[in-house]
Amino acid sequence: MTDGLDILVETLITGNLVLIQGLGLYALTRYTKSVKQAAVTGLNTVAGMLVGAAILWLLGDIVPTSPTSQLGFYVVVGFVSAVLAPYLTRQEISREYHVVDTALIGLLLLLSNRGVAGVDNLWVALGASAGYFLTLITVATIRERLELAPIPKALRGAPIILITAGLLGIALLGFRL
């Protein structure tokens, strides 16, 4: 990946955090009951991911090298970015959501595992957060339409949302080369 646009498209579509990598499924099942709630949650996560990537970019030289201390470092960066995100977006969202948001911590760990450095951190975070936001909005829209569909009682709620997410993930896998 040499170009920022290549990184953006790859993380948006074929590296989607929720549908392909399975990070943030808690938000997918809990915060997609309405499109407005999904948009607020998505915007806060976008802000958190961008703040976390910017912090990693700025502190790139002091990231620990041992795996144990590196994990702790990324958890602390994730916590700081989760606390700062609602202030940037000026949206009301519970603090417990951001603390347990696996997509935010997962993005930071993926940045570490891929060896992404410099401004590429922001490109990856922008693509991943845009994919996360679009996924939440899409699933919220589908969820509102599914309320009118005759779904068996055993599949209502989280099961049908997870099945839908799986089908959307399979569709995105078709874009991989």
Image (cartoon, grey):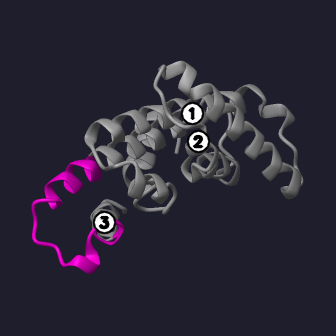
Where does the image place residue 78, in percent across and percent down from the top left? 68, 40
Frontmost of labels 3 and 1 is 3
Left or right: where 140 falls relative to 146: right
The answer to whether 100 is drawn above or below residue 146 in the figure is: above
Q: Which residue is mark 3?
A: 157
CA separation in Å, label 3 and label 1: 27 Å
The region drawn magenta spans 138-162
Mark 1 vs 2: CB contact within 8 A: yes
Q: Depth check: give the residue in front, 26 or 134.
A: 26
Left or right: where 130 falls relative to 108: left
Disc 1 on helix, strand or loop?
helix
**Which comes sooner in the sequence, label 3 or label 1?**
1
Q: Please tell me which residue is depicted at 59% across the width and 47% down the height of the picture.
A: 107
CA separation in Å, label 1 and label 2: 8 Å
Q: Amino acid at mark 3?
A: Gly
Q: Which residue is mark 1?
A: 48
Q: Which residue is mark 2?
A: 98
Where does the image place residue 65, in percent across and percent down from the top left? 87, 49
Q: Please tell me which residue is depicted at 61% across the width and 36% down the height of the picture.
A: 121
Q: Residues within 10 Å of mark 3 (few under 14, many from 20)?
A: some
Q: Is residue 112 magenta?
A: no
Q: Residues within 10 Å of mark 1 (few under 14, many from 20)?
A: many
Q: Please tell me which residue is depicted at 28% across the width and 53% down the height of the picture.
A: 139
**Which comes sooner in the sequence, label 1 or label 2?**
1
Frontmost of labels 1 and 2 is 2
Q: Amino acid at mark 1?
A: Gly
Q: Is residue 151 magenta?
A: yes
